[in-house]
Image (cartoon, coloured by chain):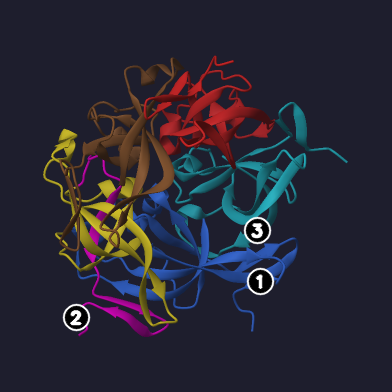
Chain colours: A brown, B red, C yellow, D cyan, E blue
Amino acid sequence: LIVGEVVGTIVASRKEEALEGLKFQIIRIEDMDPESGGLKPTGHYLVAADAVGAGHGETVLCSQGSSARLTDKTKDRPIDAVIMGIIDTIEIEGEKIFEKYAG
Amino acid sequence: LIVGEVVGTIVASRKEEALEGLKFQIIRIEDMDPESGGLKPTGHYLVAADAVGAGHGETVLCSQGSSARLTDKTKDRPIDAVIMGIIDTIEIEGEKIFEKYAG
Amino acid sequence: LIVGEVVGTIVASRKEEALEGLKFQIIRIEDMDPESGGLKPTGHYLVAADAVGAGHGETVLCSQGSSARLTDKTKDRPIDAVIMGIIDTIEIEGEKIFEKYAG
Amino acid sequence: LIVGEVVGTIVASRKEEALEGLKFQIIRIEDMDPESGGLKPTGHYLVAADAVGAGHGETVLCSQGSSARLTDKTKDRPIDAVIMGIIDTIEIEGEKIFEKYAG
Amino acid sequence: LIVGEVVGTIVASRKEEALEGLKFQIIRIEDMDPESGGLKPTGHYLVAADAVGAGHGETVLCSQGSSARLTDKTKDRPIDAVIMGIIDTIEIEGEKIFEKYAG
């Protein structure tokens, strides 16, 4: 599973029919960084279909491969990555390194 | 999902029967590059079957793995990558970093 | 299969329904390091659903891709990584490089 | 899909029954190299089952993952890579960078 | 397909039920090295279920992903890598770079 922040969107009007109604989000992939006590961008991006209605700036959990087709919204569609959860907290070694409503 | 530009084609006359009628495109894989406000080539290429009739120079969305077989044109065929959308716009942090008909 | 140590957890309250009841663990991926006679962290992390009730600090065996859905707890769920075993011993070239209850 | 040149073979007499009759080829993976106007070896190799009877020195198209099982010869067999086409020509930006019968 | 040498084993007594009876081997992944006329370790390791009863020190052929579940021993089990052949010979450019019973 991939952790990342929603930073943008992709629009493709001419596409395979089975893709109608899906929203494609751009996710900045994040690494755990226990030393700095937080997350750090990897410099890589993931493009994924959105199964949960994630908003700009939210930190999300993504699934890849055939598992990306196992949500209600993505069943039998030709996509290989999906946002399937919005993260509230990430804890490493007892320390919260990410919290959704942190100031 | 992979973003890239169609830059070439591959022809293979002797091949597995299940591949008849498929067109193989060469895609120059692009990375999001928010700093330069655009896309940048990664130096890597993807060879994919074309499910949407993408033209030379178009920026496309590709799916990999078993999901590449979930389009009408690629069903049950031994391919692991497919072009399944032609991109109109890519937006990151509220800025359009790619637009199809930009001058 | 991936070997790693459970170092944290991720909580996501808003998520695809099919994920209810799953626990997401953060695993620090470990490499075999025969020279030092042990395991060494790769600096990478894996986020996986937990099928065996692994505890913090345990060294586990993880499966990725469609195989991650082949446990009782993860059947038909949109996850691409699962903890499916808790490691007792790792032996390389006749030497135990990891033992669960070593002092 | 992977492009590469057949450079060798692997023989394994003791193996899973489902593999009987398959030929394993070693493929030197090639990258597109528009600057030099040709292909260039990546330094990596792929071992794949052969579904088309490729000969030594031929440049081939390979499929990976579950798609590798979608040819007649590889159906339901435990292989994750297959040669499924023999390449005649590769064209990038209107230039032929590979041609089978080039001198 | 991955080529490597069996160098160790992993024991996990607490695990997903579907894994009972499987043996987990550690494989030192090898690269083809035509220049030195042999194989060379990549420095990476693969953990795989054993479908053929490979012994310590044997050079084996492994399959990854969903294909790893296509052997008799691994059917429907949550594993993503399997040893499915024991290699006798590897030949590159007409030279044997590996032979099982070489002195």
The percent coordinates of residue D30 (x first, y second) are 66, 47
Q: Are marks 1 and 3 in contact (CB under 8 Å)?
A: no
Mark 2: which secondary structure?
Answer: loop
The residue where tag 1 is placed is E38
Q: Which of pointers 2 and 3 indicates the residue nearer the eye?
A: 2
Give the residue displayed 44% in from the left and 19% down from the top. A12
Which contiguous range is marked in magenta? Answer: C74-103
The reply to whether residue C39 is in sight is: yes
Q: Which mark is residue C101?
A: 2
Q: Is residue D24 above or below residue E42?
A: above
C-alpha gap between disc 1 and disc 3: 14 Å
The percent coordinates of residue B8 (x first, y second) are 66, 29
Q: Which mark is residue D9?
A: 3
Give the residue displayed 74% in from the left and 34% down from the top. D88
Q: Is residue B56 magenta?
A: no
Q: Is residue C85 magenta?
A: yes
Which subunit holds the residue at mark 3?
A: D
Mark 3: which secondary structure?
Answer: strand
Q: Are marks 2 and 3 in contact (CB under 8 Å)?
A: no
Q: Which of pointers 1 and 2 indicates the residue nearer the eye?
A: 2
Amino acid marked by disc 3: Thr
Amino acid marked by disc 1: Gly
Query: From the viewer's perspective, is C61 left or right of E90?
Result: left
**Nearer-the-camera pick, E81 or A12:** A12
Q: Residue furthest front?
A: A103
Specify the quadrant that holds the C terminus of chain C: bottom left
Amino acid marked by disc 2: Tyr
Q: Residue furthest right?
A: D103
Estimate how packed mark 1 is, as few (under 14), some (14 to 19) or many (20 or more) residues with alpha carbons within 10 Å: some
